[in-house]
Amino acid sequence: MPRRCPCRSAGEGRPEQRESLALAPALAQLARQVPRGAGILLATGLDLPGEGFDAALATLRARGPLQLLLIEDAAETAPPAMAMPCITQAGESGHLRLDPLPAERDARAARYQVPGQAVRRISTAGSSP
């Protein structure tokens, strides 16, 4: 039996349900409570950052130094070379290639490396990239 695509579990449900799980709105609310000058440590897998995520990070950086820990699982750091069977969001059987993920994660980490925001990648597989 094919397994569900990771993108389905992270984005499953109606649009309003997905948005309620998004990280950006929670970070925007949190930023209002962080005292100026406070060091902020945010650990996330960024499964569902949500609309306005970059703006929320900028607001947090304005409050104090921000450390962003990007949590990555084995499929993101050392994916299998073959296509994996999955169920698409439309409910159809398909195949998912994970081998582009390491390069995409490298680019994502580089994109978030900005002044006032340190980025560290943490692998759940036991070694950090």
Image (cartoon, helix red, strand yellow):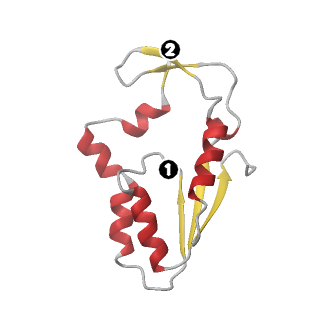
What's the residue at 35%, 51% (across, down)?
51
Q: Is residue 40 left or right of residue 49?
A: right
* Residue sitting nearer the eye, 86 or 110: 110
> Mark 1: which amino acid?
Leu
Q: Which mark is residue 85?
A: none
For the residue carrying disc 1, how many other residues have a C-alpha within 10 Å: few (<14), some (14-19), or many (20+)?
Answer: some
* Residue sitting nearer the eye, 19 or 103: 103
What's the residue at 68%, 40% (across, down)?
77
* Residue sitting nearer the eye, 42 or 3: 42
Tally the marks: 2
**Where residue 10 appears, x then y in whole percent?**
42, 39
Which residue position is annotated with label 1?
46
Q: Is residue 82 left or right of residue 88?
A: right
Image height of 18 relative to 57, above or below: above
Q: Nearer the viewer, mark 1 or mark 2?
A: 1
What's the residue at 62%, 36% (across, down)?
101
**Where residue 28 appears, x then y in whole percent?**
35, 66
Q: Secondary structure at mark 1?
A: loop
Q: Secondary structure at mark 2?
A: loop
Image height of 73 relative to 28, above or below: above
Q: Earlier in the sequence, mark 1 or mark 2?
A: 2
Which residue position is annotated with label 2?
1
Residue 14, located in which quarter of the rendered image? top left
The residues bearing labels 1 and 2 have C-alpha atoms spaced at a distance of: 28 Å
Q: Is residue 78 left or right of residue 61?
A: right
Image height of 58 relative to 6, above or below: below
**Where residue 126 appears, x then y in whole percent?**
73, 49
> Mark 2: which amino acid?
Met
